[in-house]
Image: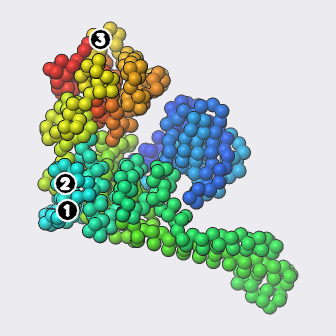
């Protein structure tokens, strides 16, 4: 009963979240002008379409205009195409490519003429397919999926590991914690957790683990919450030429480099595809032949079914006022149409055979958690599901791949960002399976304890605050600094806190009609520092600016060519130099969602050689963690006042 009740509640939560996403989108579209939505980066107005042909079974249309297109809509996003009221359109597609003045969209059905003849509007669109897949999986949860929940609900105890097999490592440069993670994952009976903080080589560990599983003739399902993380694993696995890899999901959401590994590409290039092309040719010929005969529309049928028409025609008779000649012509139309239907059935049968053939011969199937619900692998039994970004995925999401495998390995870092939840009523979805299991069964986990990203000074505070000093930095990065890029006449420490508390009139503010927050002083300082580094010879792509607030990101973006994003936008990434604008500056010590300390952890662990934090220390120090951070920089003499 406990399990049934829990599953029922999960279904309720994902429906809250689905409704919130759709409501947010429809509310925005119905209340905002197309121009306003374009300013927010969620729409593109007045573009004309041009059909480019077919690619991997999809219709590709390029939409463009003479004016620059500046949008947050990106490759892989689902979009809605319309001419007037977007909510009255049902034409959706997937973005495949973006340029300065164009955007390419793939459609899985015929594109209507109006979308090519008129100027159209493109809106970022909420996609409820993922929610439907999660709900369907929960309603028909497999035994293995139920077991995973039972471990979390204390209804089942995990088994101890089997004896560790001897391993001849492919990657000989793995450290001891990475090897320990791989050995424990290989020998677990039910599940194992790989805790991979910033820069500790989590992907490298997973790639070795997947390769070792295939050496034991295990069929592997490798998934992650995002397409980018799946592509990252796939690219590394492709270096092992012996592995047969297949990437599921929409081919246009896969990086161009990996397109040859997609199921769609493999189907198109399968030897049986020649047969399908022949059948398509036959269908086209039959359609031409059918045109000369009378289509049995209701006005000619007069209540007669296909069998009746064929029967009267075989006797050379007419009926119900329909002449024998007309009856014969309609019968011929029906016969040719049946041939066309049979040909389509043949195509479907051959396609299914090709998919079965490709999937059966694959050592590793890779997909997002959601795409693991696709029909193409519905009957496949996997020995192991290896799930990256597990601390960023909701329980209903990770249960999709878990339900398909005998055992599961989760990799992530619950000290970094949780899943993004929009609905106030679905907040419980922030609690992840990874976080719950690592709390309950610490002996079923391995911390990857050596980081290869950053200077050891940059690691010191997050290591102590979030990881109990369990991490160490590799000697290869211990002493890297920005001076290595700027030359010997520079002597900068890796960390700097710029305190704005003494600046008069330094106050956070709101843009008109926005709940987000900005800080003009911090924006100016961020831009000035970034531009100084650019003039000193640092490459544009080596500098990143992070701010927790979307409006602050926007005003900084307008004044610098370097990459500026929210904390969430930098999760899983790194730059040589990171500048953080904390924004909050008030007399009440109100720091808003800066108090989500996982965001702080992510923000301060993106830099490799230089981290600059800009903030009002008096406002920030009301939070104990920020107080310890400021105490740390003061003790190290790394704080300057302006």
Q: Residue 642 carries which label?
A: 3
- 59 lies above or below 70: below
The percent position of residue 508, horizontal first and vertical second, equals 36, 19
Residue 137 lies, with reference to residue 603, above or below; the image says below
Q: Which of these two is toward me, 598 or 411?
A: 411
Placement of 141 over or under 468, stated as above or below: below
How much space separates mark 3 and mark 1, taking CA atoms?
Answer: 57 Å
Name the residue at the top extreme.
504
Q: In which quarter of the image is residue 478?
A: top left
Would you name the residue on which mark 2 appears?
Answer: 179
From the viewer's perspective, tell me whether residue 515 is left or right of residue 110. Answer: left
Q: Distance between the residues labelled 2 and 3?
A: 48 Å
Spot occupied by residue 253 in the image (x, y as percentages of width and height): 48, 51
* Residue displayed at 45% across by 59% down: 261
Q: Residue 167 carries which label?
A: 1
Q: In which quarter of the image is the N terminus?
A: bottom left
Q: Quick check: marks 1 and 2 in contact, CB under 8 Å? A: yes
User: Do we see residue 366 in this rendering?
Assistant: yes
Residue 28 place in picture, x, y as percent? 51, 37
Q: Earlier in the sequence, mark 1 or mark 2?
A: 1
Left of 105 or right of it: where is 317? right
User: How is the rendered protein coloured?
Assistant: rainbow
Q: Residue at x 32, y 64 (%)?
A: 220
């Amino acid at each position: 009963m406990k399990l049934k009740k829990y599953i029922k509640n999960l279904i309720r939560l994902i429906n809250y979240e689905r409704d919130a996403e759709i409501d947010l989108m429809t509310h925005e579209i119905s209340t905002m002008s197309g121009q306003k939505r374009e300013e927010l980066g969620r729409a593109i107005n007045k573009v004309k379409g041009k059909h480019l042909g077919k690619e991997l079974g999809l219709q590709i249309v390029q939409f463009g205009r003479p004016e620059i297109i500046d949008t947050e809509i990106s490759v892989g996003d689902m979009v809605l195409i319309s001419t007037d009221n977007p909510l009255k359109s049902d034409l959706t597609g997937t973005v495949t490519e973006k340029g300065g003045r164009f955007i390419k969209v793939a459609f899985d059905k015929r594109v209507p003429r109006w979308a090519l003849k008129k100027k159209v509007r493109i809106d970022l669109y909420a996609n409820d397919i993922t929610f439907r897949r999660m709900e369907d999986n929960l309603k028909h949860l497999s035994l293995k999926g139920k077991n995973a929940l039972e471990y979390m609900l204390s209804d089942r105890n995990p088994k101890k590991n089997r004896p560790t097999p001897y391993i001849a490592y492919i990657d000989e440069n793995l450290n001891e914690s990475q090897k320990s993670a791989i050995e424990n994952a290989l020998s677990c009976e039910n599940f194992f957790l790989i805790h991979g903080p910033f820069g500790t080589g989590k992907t490298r560990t997973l790639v070795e683990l997947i390769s070792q599983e295939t050496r034991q003739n295990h069929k592997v399902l490798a998934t992650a919450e995002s397409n980018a993380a799946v592509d990252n694993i796939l690219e590394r696995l492709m270096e092992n030429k012996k592995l047969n890899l297949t990437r599921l999901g929409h081919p246009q959401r896969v990086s161009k480099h990996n397109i040859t590994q997609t199921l769609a590409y493999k189907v198109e290039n399968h030897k049986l595809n020649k047969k399908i092309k022949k059948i398509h040719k036959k269908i086209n010929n039959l359609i031409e032949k059918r045109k000369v005969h009378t289509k049995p529309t209701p006005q000619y049928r007069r209540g007669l079914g296909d069998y009746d028409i064929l029967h009267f025609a075989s006797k050379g008779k007419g009926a119900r006022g329909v002449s024998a000649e007309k009856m014969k012509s309609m019968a011929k139309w029906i016969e040719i149409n049946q041939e066309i239907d049979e040909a389509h059935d043949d195509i479907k049968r051959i396609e299914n055979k090709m998919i079965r053939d490709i999937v059966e011969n694959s050592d590793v199937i890779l997909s997002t958690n959601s795409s693991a619900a696709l029909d193409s692998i519905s009957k496949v039994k996997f020995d192991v599901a290896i799930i990256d970004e597990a601390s960023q995925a909701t329980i209903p999401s990770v249960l999709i791949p878990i339900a398909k495998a005998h055992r599961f390995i989760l990799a992530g870092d619950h000290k970094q960002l949780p899943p993004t939840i929009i609905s106030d009523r679905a907040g419980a979805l922030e609690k992840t399976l990874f976080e719950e299991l690592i709390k309950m069964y610490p002996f079923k986990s391995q911390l990857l304890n050596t980081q290869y990203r950053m200077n050891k000074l940059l690691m010191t505070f997050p290591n102590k605050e979030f990881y109990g000093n369990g991490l160490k930095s590799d000697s290869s990065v211990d002493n890297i600094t920005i001076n290595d890029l700027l030359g010997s006449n520079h002597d900068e420490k890796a960390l700097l806190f710029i305190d704005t508390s003494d600046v008069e009139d330094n106050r956070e503010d709101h843009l008109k009609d926005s709940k987000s927050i900005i800080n003009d002083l911090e924006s100016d300082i961020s831009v000035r520092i970034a531009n100084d580094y650019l003039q000193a010879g640092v490459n544009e792509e080596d500098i990143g600016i992070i701010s927790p607030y979307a409006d602050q990101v926007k005003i900084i973006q307008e004044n610098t060519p370097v990459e500026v994003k929210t904390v969430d936008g930098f999760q899983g990434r790194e730059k040589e130099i990171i500048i953080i604008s904390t924004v909050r500056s008030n007399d009440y010590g109100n720091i808003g969602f800066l108090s989500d300390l996982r965001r702080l952890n992510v923000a301060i662990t993106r830099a490799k050689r230089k981290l600059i934090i800009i903030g009002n220390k008096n406002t920030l120090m009301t939070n104990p963690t920020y107080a310890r951070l400021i105490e740390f920089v003061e003790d190290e003499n790394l704080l300057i006042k302006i």
